[in-house]
Image: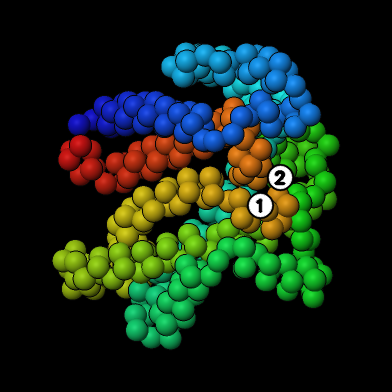
Amino acid sequence: MSFGTYLLRRLLHIIPALVGLSILIFVLSRVIPGDPARLALGPDATAEQVEQLRREMGLDRPLVAQYVRYVGGLFRGDFGFSLRTRRNVAQDIREFLPATVELTTVAMIIAVGVGMPLGVLAAVHKDRTADHISRLLALGGVALPRFWVAILLQLLFAYYLGILPTIGRGPAPPVRITGLFLVDSLLALNLPAFLAALKHLILPAVALSLGSLAQIARLVRANMIEEMRRDYALAARSYGLPERVIIFKYVLKNAFSSALTVIGLSYGFLLGNAFLVETVFAWPGLAFYGVDSLLFKDLNAVVGVTIVVGVAFALVNLLVDVAYGYLDPRIRYES
């Protein structure tokens, strides 16, 4: 199978997954108890006012008609009206999504940048001190709750040492281009704004990255040990190639391709599950907005956030599949 055909098939696989997700979350959001119109207007509203708002929101129509109307709006970029913010949900998502994307991306850079070398170091020094330290860090990264780690980081680096801020994203760059403070401040050549955004990102990104970092480190260690025992590695050693060449030129590539799936899944998972860290650090992200919308029973906002996270998750997995097929041609032929 050519790489183009492989890519096209992977693209087509996304469509039924997104359609299924949209149906599932739309139905669930409509059957949970509570009247969103009543919640929006408050207890003092009359029955006539509540009924009028229900008609304006289309809640008096059959469920299928509501879904068709909603999907039609999605193709026009209309995610519906938010009962909480009184704006179009698409406008809210454009405002909150960049903060979560920036936080998640930096967290994944930390997870991969630290987890990969940690896994390689543990595999090369198997059953020695470096391996034991790596195992201890990985165990802590998986076992410790994110919010607890976040509070500890705040106490240590913000309260006692006073070197990093505790909450928020810092002052916004003078010009909003992408919504990513790091990128916008660099594009504006505003170094103080860039440093301020970076300082605000460090603690929440570290707290968010620990679980993925631990998973990547353990997976890379296991893959590296397995690859180092394979025939091609033994043959390379018999030819007298230096160990570092065998590890970094041959073994690491195969070990990394196996870890790509976990990296992609971790990114999608963090994108939609960062709300605990965002809550502790008062980070104005999409997860924080989604949880508030769910508590308020803001149906359009809940469905909009879920669909955006689902699309992002599907695209990240598509990129992982493409990279996997590029690095290992056997995947394309097996497909």
Vertical placement of residue 244 versus 283, above or below? below
Q: Position of residue 213 (x, y in %)?
A: 49, 63
Q: Position of residue 242 (x, y in %)?
A: 31, 72
Asked if one can make out residue 12 in the rendered structure from this viewpoint, the answer is yes
Q: Nearer the viewer, residue 3 or 290?
A: 290
Q: Is residue 193 left or right of residue 6?
A: right
The numbered disc on residue 278 is: 1
Q: Which residue is mark 2?
A: 284
Please report the residue visible at 45 percent of the width from the left and 52 percent of the height from the top. Answer: 266
Q: Position of residue 175 (x, y in %)?
A: 80, 33
287 vs 222: above or below: above
**Residue 97 in sight from this viewpoint:** no
How many dots with numbers? Answer: 2
- Residue 97 vertical placement versus 70 (above, below): below
Residue 319 lies in quadrant: top left
Report the amino acid beneath label 1. Glu
- Disc 1 packing (10 Å; few <14; some 14–19; many ≥20): many
Instruction: Name the side, left or right, on which 181 lies relative to 136.
Output: right
Hey, what amino acid is under mark 2?
Pro
**Do the residues under discs 2 and 1 have CB atoms within 8 angstroms?**
yes
If the image is split into quadrants, where does the N terminus sit?
Answer: top left
- Please state, as top left, top right, bottom left or bottom right, where the C terminus lies in the image: top left
